[in-house]
Image: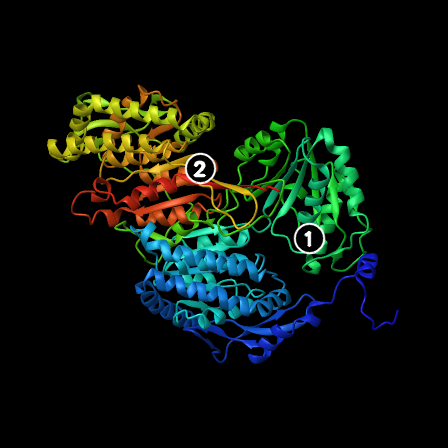
Amino acid sequence: MASGAPKTVYDIFQSMEYGPSVSSSSAAARSWLEQHSESLGLFVDGKFVSPVERQTIPATDSSGAALCSIICAKDEDVSACVSSASAGFKAWSEQSAHHRSKVLLRLARTLQRYSQCVSELCDLSQCPSSPSALVRLAQYYAGWAQLRDTLMPDWTPRGVVAVVVSDDCPFYSIWLKALPALAMGNAVIVVPGVKMAPPALLLAQVFMEAGLPAGVLNVITGDCSLGAKVAQSFHVSYLTYCGSKQDGEHLAKQLAGWGVPWSLSLSVSAMCPFIIFESADIDSAVDGVIEAAFKKSKDWQWVLCVQESVWDSVVARLKLRMTGMKCVPLANQTHRGLVDTAVKEALQQGATLIQSCPPPSTGGLYPPTVLCGLAPPCSAVTTPPPGPLLPLLSFRSAVEGVTLGNHSPHGQAASIWTEDLTLALEAARSLRVGSVWVNSHSVTDPSLLQSGRRDSGTCTDGGREGLYQFLWPSLAPRLPRSTPRSLDYSMFGTTASTFMVPEGFDPSSVPRSCSQFIGGKLCKADSGCSRAVRSPGGAVLAHCPEGGRKDIRNAVEAALKVQPGWQKKSTAARAHSLYALADSLDKRRRDMAASIQGQTGFSMNEAEKEVELSISRLSDWAARCDKQSGVVPPLPQTGSAFLIPEALGVVGVVLPDTRPLLPLVSLLGAAVAMGNAVIMVASEKHPLPAIDFTEVLQMSDIPGGVVSVITGGRDQLTQALANHSEIQAIWYWGTVEGCQFIQHTCCSPLKRMWLHCKEEEEEDKERGRYWTHPSPSFKEEMWREAVVWKSVWIPTA
């Protein structure tokens, strides 16, 4: 055959050579880069701008050749970008939902015309993405833009949203965040990594051609500190980040004290279990393993868990299937050193290798490799290096397989393989991950949620649930924007408050000595200390325990023992318990009203109204227990999906001083109704009604440990809650300094946060109208803060 003659399909399959390189089939992308003189500026106010005297960064292709140069924005560029976005938000949010929907539909059509250029530029930039997937995103969120005012009437857009995405993420992840933000009426500032900058700027141009008003979408490029600079502007209302855990934590700490809510999607290098049960179709499962673990660009790291009864069969098929596979290119030479170190350590720990061919002595290529027989604590399993390495572990029973799947600190996704539907659904329920694929892997669609657990993030993307991060409940107070306070994080809450004892004070004259409620029992503080609680007139009413770190620890231990069982109870059983709690409170309504009056100085009529509202609020949550269900979304492909709300786990709640009882039962009801355990820090100013309520709790049938009530200094107990690794979320009503401390501390270990500033509430002249007359959106927000979402995908023929 002549060297210039085209090869047949048979010849290609015989040689298994790579097809033409990207550089030889990227005419459209290179033409677009040439139009910009291979020097891309910023996209601000609907046009490309190239400020002078700016440092530039080269963007390279897979071979290391320069594609173009990227501008590093300065502070004045950030200011111009944020000002443009603020003006764009005003114009965009005032337009009708129908108009916003039409713009996104035009975007979908325009994307189809640019599909070849987009695909080529993504390939050149080493962040491949399917244009059809982007078109599907635009069409999906055009529908939600149309329906927002109808289905979410009590929610308003946040304002200017910053979307920060690192180079390690798929290009798709930018628009999975930016498009829903735009659909809900926000303006968006995209801060991409260097690799993603060229296709992100191309997409911004496509948006403008589709009719998006100037300033509604801006793209600004630069170094890793740019995301924090953008979010620290007072015009930015929210930040969402996708990237590595280390960079996400650093960004979160930079934003502590600025009053900017944020969410993190830490999917990069997330370790995801690929579990093969003995009832699986082994051939299909092994094909799935090869495709998931060894493709050139993969979204997650995988660990293969195989039941012992089919171990030999799986290993034999892996050896056969990997025969002749070619080496996979690594991102850079540094990764080669990490891979070599991981393989050497695994061999020292007794692992055996399955490789398609011997690895080259040097260079950026490495063969697909399976590390057989590793132990779960091995570093190649817990912190795998980037590259084509697949750890292989074994398990005996199905329960052990699920336990092994939950061994990772990450909670991004899992793939389970079995022909037993009952086993598949039970395993999917038990795995602590955000996405579960049955007999498949890596299935994505805008209607399928992507929700991280534990170290994989606090963000929910996709579907209707993913829209709420870009909306704000009407009439709800927001965190005040300010510059960070001077705060020593290591000393926050370590100094107990001091109380002056009146001269000649007689302890026997105190009417009562109170206890806190931990593990279903009344007990004193572990420190043995107590504090005086006074009436509005200054008289000492009681001595309350001065709780501390050990009390929080004891409460968490009790909660961890009972919360899994409480979550597994039927919704009807949880509803019955809350109804019974409401009835018990009703029987003690006069005593509770007297407690509120004596502690706060409210009139008896006002105190009775608060008790009545508290009884009603508990009944509301009891009624919602078995009414809040999951969703079965319609999908454009064959298969079935379930979106399931699940309990967070252990929730720490720091209660406000505005009302002594109503916030307690409102938040307790929301958390407990969804299967969580809750540790409540009583109002520092008015703790007695909360203590009296524990007597109602003690007589209820809610298991001991599901609810704990601790009294003491707010800062000391907040510090203990924030630093406890087993607490999954913190709901906080307190000071600006407390909010800043939680934002700084709760990114490692990562926790979900719901923060409110006490200073804002004190401006409410109607004594807590936020609690007494909550809007429907506030109740819905309360419920959404109490759950985390899981998507389960089951393919069908």
Disc 2: CA contacts within 10 A as few (<14), some (14-19) or many (>=20)? many
Which type of secondary structure does the marked residue at label 1 adopt?
Answer: loop
243 vs 91, left or right, is: right
Location of residue 741 in the rendering, given as x and y in whole percent from the top left corner: 39, 47
Location of residue 428 in the rendering, given as x and y in whole percent from the top left corner: 55, 35
Outermost residue, top direction?
A: 699
Residue beneath disc 1: 295
Which type of secondary structure does the marked residue at label 2 adopt?
Answer: loop
Which quadrant: the N terminus? bottom right
Q: In which quarter of the image is residue 66?
A: bottom right
Which quadrant: the C terminus? top right
The disc labelled 2 sits on which kind of residue?
Leu
Task: Give the spatial CA distance, label 2 vs label 1.
Answer: 33 Å
The disc labelled 1 sits on which kind of residue?
Lys
Nearer-the-camera pick, 165 or 422: 422
The circle on residue 246 is: none
**Placement of 175 over or under 409, stated as above or below:** below
**Placement of 686 over or under 5, stated as above or below:** above
Location of residue 550 in the rendering, given as x and y in whole percent from the top left corner: 41, 30
Residue positioned 72% across, 37% down in the render: 282
Mark 2 vs mark 1: give the one in front.
1
Nearer-the-camera pick, 102 or 338: 102
The reply to whether residue 568 is visible in this rendering is yes
Q: Which of marks 2 and 1 is nearer the N terminus?
A: 1
Could you tell me if the residues under marks 2 and 1 are in contact, i.e. CB atoms within 8 Å? no
Location of residue 325 in the rendering, given as x and y in whole percent from the top left corner: 78, 52
778 vs 220, left or right, is: left
Residue beneath disc 2: 648
**Placement of 255 over or under 522, stated as above or below:** below
Nearer-the-camera pick, 506 or 401: 401
Residue positioned 46% across, 56% down in the render: 140
Nearer-the-camera pick, 223 or 459: 459
